[in-house]
Amino acid sequence: MISFNYETDFTLDKPEVISNWISNTILEENCKEGEINYVFCSDDYLHKLNVDFLNHDTLTDIISFDYSVGKELHGDIYISVDRVKENASDFEVSFEDELARVIIHGILHYCGYKDKSEADEKTMRSKEDLYLSKRN
């Protein structure tokens, strides 16, 4: 089950459409959907998590805590709406497109994709682009 939670004034447009898109992505990756919680928050909220849990004193757009068991995906995905807005501007894309990329990025991590090396990052971007093309 996919749930959307808010620690900011932001709310998703058409959450059921987004949830279906995420579910379809999980199936296409031959994984099983478990409990996946998205939390949309501010830079301050996410920065505190980054410092407290990961010892990183930096701003980021997404932090995911993966509790998956094998191919059954479970986890909490925190997304800074502030950072997504700024990144959208920096990358000259719409807020909706950047948000969708970050949303699916977290799921792809749960599916086993990494982005630490240049080769892994290229694969991750390719998968993001694939699933972004399938969104409604």
Image (spheres, rainbow, N blue to C red):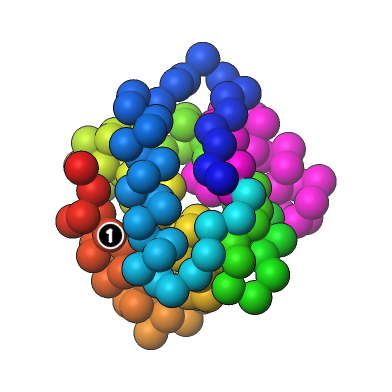
Residue 44 found in image quarter: top right
Residue bearing mark 1? 131
Q: Tally the marks.
A: 1
Magenta span of residues: 36-62
Q: Position of residue 40 (x, y in %)?
A: 54, 32
Q: Position of residue 38 (x, y in %)?
A: 56, 40
Number of other residues with Cα within 10 Å of mark 1, as a class: few under 14, some 14 to 19, many 20 or more: some
Q: Name the residue furthest top.
A: 9
Give whichever of 34, 121 is nearer the camera.
34
Q: Position of residue 20 (x, y in %)?
A: 36, 45
What residue is shown at x 58% (from left), y 73% (from top)? 71
Q: Position of residue 25 (x, y in %)?
A: 36, 60
Taking the magenta stretch, the answer to whether it contains residue 42 is: yes
Name the amino acid type tagged 1: Tyr
Q: Is residue 76 above or below residue 26?
A: above
In this rendering, would 34 be left or right of 84? Answer: right
